[in-house]
Amino acid sequence: MSDNSADIAMPSGPDPTAHWPVDLLVTGAELVATMDDERREIAGGWVAVTDGLVSAVGGPGDPTPQAVKVLRADGCLVTPGLVNTHHHIYQNLTRSYRAANEGSLFTWLTTLYPQWARLDEEAAYVSAWVGLVELALGGCTTTTDHLYVHPAGAGDLVSAEIEAAVELGMRFHPTRGSMSLSQKDGGLPPDSVVQDDDTILADSQRLVQRWHDPSHGAMVRVALAPCSPFSVTPELMVKTAELAERLDVRLHTHLAEDADEDTFAAEKFGCRTVEHFEAVGWMSDRSWVAHCIFPNQAEVTRLGAAGVGAAHCPSSNMMVGGAGALAPVAEMRTAGMKVGLGCDGSASSDAASLWMEARNAMLLGKLRHGPAAMGARTALEIATRGGAGCLGREGEIGELSVGAVGDLVCWPLEGVRFAGAISDPIDAWLRCGPVDARHTVVAGRSVVEDGAPTAFGVDEMLARHRTASERIQAPTGAQPLPLPETSRESVVPTTDSRVVRESAGPCGQVGVREW
């Protein structure tokens, strides 16, 4: 699509007899950027939501429906809700952790693993609650999360996260992350945060059976997500792909995040990291990967032909990606990959704003290929439709069209920061700012209204988060602070599934390999 404001289309009105009265009407916008198949941009537009889905989109010449609730969007750009395709929300418990701030990716990880070994249900719950509110303030309505640290005795961490998302009304795609290779096996993490393959596979199946909703408009879907090539066995990658196929869920992992990955893969598997990814059965449109900074062009072509998606994490890549950490976003999109945006872990980018990630994606695109390479419209498309493609929800999230979910954001383009920006609201949205959402709506319900979270108890939750953060950041070897008494009931497993693990050798060769 073009990044020229001349693409603005004439409004197309809805059937004035359908779906009235509606549950929610968002009206008075300076511009509605629908991101539908025609990429309609409707000056003075409005959006109606009924039963959690978009029921009508119109312009100033179309009759507006009666509504149970009306949200004014005067002076605002209205967009679909932004989609976060990669995150580690629990890491907001170790934000800006001084000992790790100047390290490379591998140094950063090995510094923080001992702290994350103290994660438990309370910490997972409060970090998710606070992290999801932060994402909503930055215009996110759907987010995934990659929770791969599961210390012994920590409890049901993923269910604790889901509980927070359900309470807040956020659309959530948690992934059952995992690590099975500790330092003694040649991996990076310590023994305290890894699990054996059978435990991982059984719990993956349990979580899918308990929480995954495949229906249109679902609020919770679960994906399976071994952490990375340097923290799990090839056997786990193979069996996870087979389990995802059987359960019909998506697959997620880190890939080509660091230049050292290819060195590691060559030593351990006898091939490049993307070749290993393909050999263990992940090269399919069921998979989306995080970062994907260092594939070569031939690998990008193969990934695109297979329909693999990629979560572009511009802020994190700049923080810990090292020299040359410019993901080949334009090349991936040209090759057919679905490219979305990711905030990544709060401890690597230290902020969780998809507006910031969209702006940084735009700037890095220009840095890599020149001023005309990526504009605000392309960045918005990546943040919405691209994220929908990564999560397998095209036509459902990431656009404002009849039948899509009623997720949208009203971005105020007013005040000192936007003075003079009157020719193109979409360009102004990313070139000016910074800006937070005035209203963030998920399934027709406000989670942010007039710039503030609608959830009750933010101050109490921040206090609980501070307590958990102090306990987790206590110096290694020190006695962790005791857990506070809380009213939240523990989330416990409900099934006892077992999945048999078979053996697979490196780069797809069946055989035995010692770890």
Image (cartoon, rainbow, N blue to C red):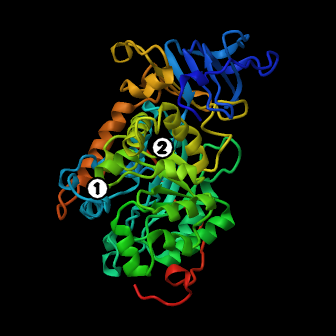
Q: Position of residue 42 (x, y in %)?
A: 63, 19
The numbered mark, 2 or 1, whose residue comes first in the sequence reads 2
**Would residue 484 be seen by someone viewing this image from the given angle?**
no
Q: Residue at x 46, y 13 (%)?
A: 422
Q: Position of residue 487 (x, y in %)?
A: 42, 43
Q: Is residue 493 above or below residue 488?
A: below
Distance (Cα) linking label 2 and label 1: 37 Å
Q: Residues within 10 Å of mark 2 (few under 14, many from 20)?
A: many
Residue that badge 2 annotates: 164
Q: Residues within 10 Å of mark 1 (few under 14, many from 20)?
A: few
Label 1: element kind: loop
Quarter of the image for the C terminus: give it: bottom left
Quarter of the image for the N terminus: give it: top right
Label 2: element kind: helix
Q: Which mark is residue 495?
A: none
Q: Position of residue 125 (x, y in %)?
A: 42, 47
Which residue is more in the foreground, 48 or 323? Answer: 323
The three-letter amino acid code for the residue at tag 1 is Ala
In which quarter of the view is residue 466 placed?
Answer: top left
**Would residue 131 be seen by someone viewing this image from the given angle?**
yes
Q: Residue at x 35, y 45 (%)?
A: 315
Residue 335 placement, left or right of 186: right
Which residue is more in the foreground, 434 or 498? Answer: 434
Residue closest to the far bottom: 512
Residue 383 placement, left or right of 105: right
Residue that badge 1 annotates: 323
Q: What number of labels is visible?
A: 2
The three-letter amino acid code for the residue at tag 2 is Ala
Q: Is residue 258 above or below residue 451?
A: below
The mark lying in front, picked from 2 and 1, is 1
In which quarter of the view is residue 408 placed?
Answer: top right
Q: Position of residue 277 (x, y in %)?
A: 51, 70
